[in-house]
Amino acid sequence: MTWAPGPPAAVVVPCGRPNPPRGGLPPCRWRHAAVKRTHLLAVPASVALVAAGLSPLVAQALPASAAPDPTLAARATAERIVAARAPELHPSANDAFVRTQVIGTPWNLNYVAYERTYRGLPVVGGDFVVVTDNQGEVRDLSVAQKQAIDVGITSKIGQAAAAKTSRAALTKADGTAVKPRLVVYALGAPRLAWEATVSGRDGKENSRKKVYVDARTGKRFAEQELVYAGTGTGIWEGSNLTIGTTQSGGQYTLSDPARSGLTCGDYSGKQIFSGPDDLWGSASKTNKESGCVDVMYAGAGFWDLLKSYGRNGLNGSGRWSPAYVGLNQVNAYWTGSEADFGHNNQNQWITSTDVVDHEFGHGLDNFTPGSMSGGGTQEFVGDVWGASVEAFLNNPADTPDYTVGELVNLTGSGPIRNMYNPSLVNNDPNCYSSSVPNMEVHKAAGPGNHWFYLLAEGSNPGGGKPTSPTCNNSQVTGVGVSTASKIFYNAMAMKTSGTSYPRYRVLTLSAAKNLDPTCGLYAKTKAAWDAVSMSAQSGEPTCTAH
């Protein structure tokens, strides 16, 4: 489901230039402002916000001999920006800010994410991310909110009425209690709203949604889907796979001791598989334990890929999320806290790497700033990570490609999506248009999947890889799947609420620019978006090599 109304307003402010040298002319136009030290972290850092009219906030510079921990310098910079109530945050006198996470990377980039409250109420769309280098210099400021909030906080609609209206967002709500909370909804013009989480069935699918009801009119105006379908012998990934297991007494369990939280069990009882020996699975494609071998293998691969990015686990704090095999549906889901895997039309468990890590890719989306993406981008985000981990593992039993679910053959018609030419499956769109955000979310993945293939491989990669048509008849050169994945991860670290296709263009351009001062990655990222008709956006960064 997509966020409504429309894509969120947002701004990214690029900088990335060094502080001006003493006695020399600055490379940018600078204006200095005093910064109060009250409520700031103890580590001093020079803070510079440059470009598009930003006012720099300059604090005492660190001595040349100091070597601060990069995340501490990033936090100090972000706290100073917040304490100074930088106008780019669109603050009101009634706003308060809470730091939610800090993401460090090996690429001289750090991300500090915040959420805000207004008169004590949570603000949906009030989040932002401060991006710094390891010296604490500001590289970007990614802000979801477009204007300061000035709304009353007294609801004309009661909580019970809001709960009833929220349940109507589902075809059939289950018996879970619905307890709406008052929030300020700031994706668009700020308004007071009730936010409720409802669960049940939406059509034929399992569903859990956040639903927003206008606190003045009682009308439901926005919703966000939270459930996304999406040595042992595995079903699809081959035999003699090495997986992490835990021994306790005379029992072994499918719980990876080196990757906390990575477990797999039977969906019917939500119990982790265990046994008297450390041999798992069989050649049977209907064996749940074999499906779990695939899951443990694919999950470990994703963990290791993220570790190379400096990330500790799926949640960034050293934890993965559990998985269960045995869902009695022709589907797989990310529920917000776990991944559940069903079967294909032949009752074989659908646990190939691209499917498993598609679902865990939703988890990464969930745990990075801004939470779940919106505007029809959710499924392309999952597909990117399925393809990326498949390439990272490079398993001859499941050779890397850019088709989704080709091994599991979900419905008997081959892959369920194609990234190099989306139109080959279900006539999914190759090119972006204004209708894409309103399409069914799996169909809406087409332009994003196409963009990622063009960025990774190009339009005519050779080496036996498929050619990819472009929407503007251009020739595009790829950067390689490893670099493309790195760009996308850094873009996700800058996400804010409801990130849409236009927003992903801006964020990936910013990420490419921050990663490569020569502007080569920026140019290829831009060319790939242009090639899928995702046109230039107001406020997107430009890049000049230095």
Image (cartoon, grey):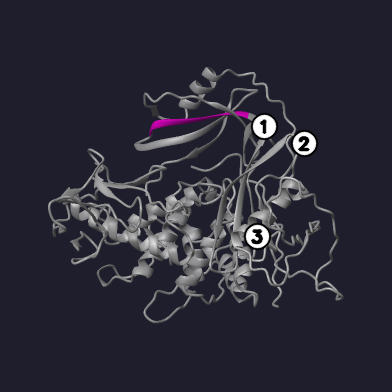
Residue at the (52%, 26%) spot, across then down: 180
From this viewpoint, is residue 342 visible? Answer: no
Q: Earlier in the sequence, mark 1 or mark 2?
A: 2
Q: Please report contact status of discs 1 and 2: CB closer than 8 Å, yes or no.
A: no
In the rendered image, residue 546 lying in the magenta stretch gets the answer no
Image depth: mark 3 or mark 2 in front: 3
Q: Secondary structure at mark 3?
A: helix
When the figure is inspected, residue 56 is found, relative to residue 214, above or below; the finding is below
**Residue 489: percent from the left, percent from the top?**
51, 61
Mark 2: amino acid: Ala
Check disc 3 and report the residue beneath it. Answer: 73
Circle on res. 93: 2
**Residue 431: percent from the left, percent from the top?**
53, 60
Closest to the observer, 156 or 393? 393
Q: Which residues are magenta?
A: 193-201
Image depth: mark 1 or mark 2 in front: 2
From this viewpoint, is residue 265 visible? Answer: yes
Residue at the (74%, 46%) spot, across then down: 83
Mark 1: amino acid: Arg
Closest to the observer, 475 or 355? 355
Mark 3: amino acid: Ala
The main secondary structure of the magenta stretch is: strand
Check disc 1 and report the residue beneath it. Answer: 191
